[in-house]
Image: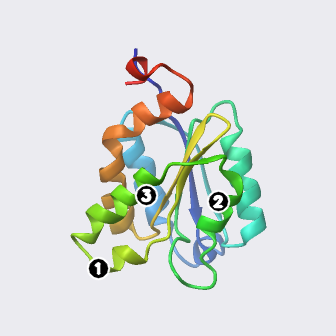
Amino acid sequence: MGVEIRAAVLTVSDRCARGEQEDESGALLFELLREAGATVVAREILPDDLEPLAERLRALAEREDVNLVVTTGGTGLSPRDNTPEATRSVIEREVPGLAEAMRAETLRKTPTAMLSRGLCGTRSGALVVNLPGSPKGARECFAVIRPVLAHAVGLVAGRAHEDAK
């Protein structure tokens, strides 16, 4: 019995929110999720403001029709990169293995991967995953976690271990 992934993609970028830059990473994740068999029920762009971002993450994770929230952007070291802080304030339980795996695997390709501060965790039956804002980083990190996403989402939903796959 498979798990249907119902995802929300949230791009965190001042420039995209102002219309100064195209949301390439959000569009890419939309396609990657669809290729993985997920239904994308929401795709949004927000600026890097901490409190509105935390509020939106909370609202998306608590939607009945969402069991996966994927963010792209805001995970670096610049003063406006607030995605990990917003995520930390929203999640109920951290899932460090996903973030560790993404950093470890992408570090093999680029030394700047060690600068990513992305987090992963759960809230209200949804898995929340922070991905980098660059299309290359988002694609590479998504490839790392894709094989376990349906299983993870099933476990978060309370399915028995053997039924979550």
Q: Position of residue 14 (x, y in %)?
A: 63, 76
Amino acid type at mark 1 = Pro
Identify the residue at horizontal 45%, vertical 24% (top origin): 3
Task: In the displayed orientation, state which residue is furthest to the top.
Answer: 1
Residue 38 appears in view: no
The residue tagged 2 is 88
The residue tagged 3 is 99
Q: Quadrant of the C terminus?
A: top left
Task: In the displayed orientation, state which residue is furthest to the left.
Answer: 108
The residue tagged 1 is 111
Q: State the image quarter where residue 49 is shown.
A: bottom right
Earlier residue among tags 2 and 3? 2
Q: Nearer the viewer, residue 43 or 157?
A: 157
Earlier residue among tags 1 and 3? 3
Amino acid type at mark 3 = Ala
Identify the residue at horizontal 67%, vertical 71% (top origin): 47
Identify the residue at horizontal 47%, vertical 54% (top origin): 96
Mark 2–mark 1 Cα distance, whole angstroms, equals 25 Å
Q: Dot 2 lies on which element?
A: helix
Q: Position of residue 161 (x, y in %)?
A: 42, 23
Earlier residue among tags 2 and 1? 2
Left/right placement of residue 43 relative to residue 27 reads right
Mark 2–mark 3 Cα distance, whole angstroms, equals 13 Å
Q: State the image quarter where residue 151 is shown.
A: top left
Identify the residue at horizontal 66%, vertical 75% (top origin): 18
Q: Dot 3 lies on which element?
A: helix
